[in-house]
Amino acid sequence: MKSVVVTGVSTGIGWGVTKVLIAQGFRVFGSVRKQADADRLRQEFGERYVPLIFDVTDEAAVRAAAAMVAEALGGETLAGVVNNAGMAVAGPLMNLPIAEFRHQIEVNLTGVVIVTQAFGPLLAPGDGRTGKPGRIVNISSVGGRNATPFVGPYNASKFAVEGLSLALRRELLLLGVDVIVIAPGAVATPIWGKAKEEDILPYRDTPFYPALQKVHAYMNGLGATGLPPEVIGEAVAKALTLAKPKPRYTVTPDPFRNFIGEVMPTRMFDRMIGGQLGLLPKG
């Protein structure tokens, strides 16, 4: 049975990836931060789901989980590591508390490195392991190539994941371990529900507040129009199983908007976004 490690599986994309991979015959070692979530998912997914309890920023806990997985593999290579765990920090960059920015980067970027260093050695044959080399799938975002005002911390983390993945793929040519990026657009996940709870009042005395309210309202609506998490799970399954996967897959409910953002001249796109949000100077 092929085994895969997926981080952040309690809800959303990680849950969808776990559901799809288990249905396709994989055993999924899925990370959560709470024992209650581990128990719930074990009941939902059955014996092919093996819970790992750690926060991706806790290096010691991640390495302990990797040792447990190594023992469970019984000398076989790991088929894949899916770096999915993440969160979103929003706010105007000119006013955002530095602690919040650091936390965004720590979870979405440093956490990817911590997990990859801990589980990556299990992907390659050698040191007593046999089998084909596994793959790393990093969950980025359409926001990893195009940025939205007031989502700058999240964009910064995902732009960085894109660069990290490119460098890592070229380094791991030596071991035969491929690295694939999945870049979702809006997905119906709790990350957008959390945006409803985001307290934007600390920015009410800044000139950005009216535009921030518009972005906040837009983010709140994404959950209703987003893709089911299982669609991203299908893309991850392809990345793990196709003989020759693409290095990057974009999966979005609005491909035209994403296309426009990539091909429109940057200054023109700046003004279009600025006009929509009321960020252009008056007069």
Image (spheres, rainbow, N blue to C red):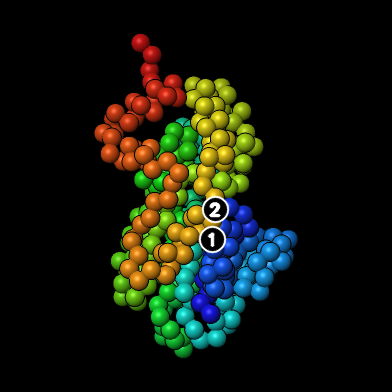
Q: Quadrant of residue 55?
A: bottom right
Three-letter amino acid code at the position of disc 1? Val
Q: Residue at x 54, y 73 (%)?
A: 25
Q: Are marks 1 and 2 in contact (CB under 8 Å)?
A: yes
User: Is 82 drawn above or below residue 194 in the view shown?
Assistant: below
Residue 258: image location, x then y, percent: 37, 41
Q: Residue at x 53, y 24 (%)?
A: 209
For residue 160, say whether it is visible: no
For residue 105, say whether it is visible: yes
Comes first in the chain, label 1 or label 2: 1
Outermost residue to the bottom: 128
In the image, taking residue 56 as reference, residue 135 lies left or right, namely left
In the image, taking residue 144 as reference, residue 13 lies left or right, namely right
Q: Residue at x 57, y 35 (%)?
A: 220
Choose between 31 and 261: the one closer to the eye. 261
Tag 1 residue: 17
Tag 2 residue: 229
Q: How many marks?
A: 2
Kindly state the secondary structure of the residue where label 1 is placed: helix
Q: Residue at x 40, y 77 (%)?
A: 133
Q: Quadrant of the C terminus?
A: top left
Outermost residue to the top: 283
Residue 227: image location, x then y, percent: 51, 47
User: Is 266 drawn above or below residue 130 in the view shown?
Assistant: above
Q: Residues within 10 Å of mark 1 (few under 14, many from 20)?
A: many
- CA gap between label 1 and label 2 equals 7 Å
User: Is 282 drawn above or below residue 79 in the view shown?
Assistant: above
Q: Which circle marks residue 59 in the picture?
A: none
Residue 154: image location, x then y, percent: 47, 44
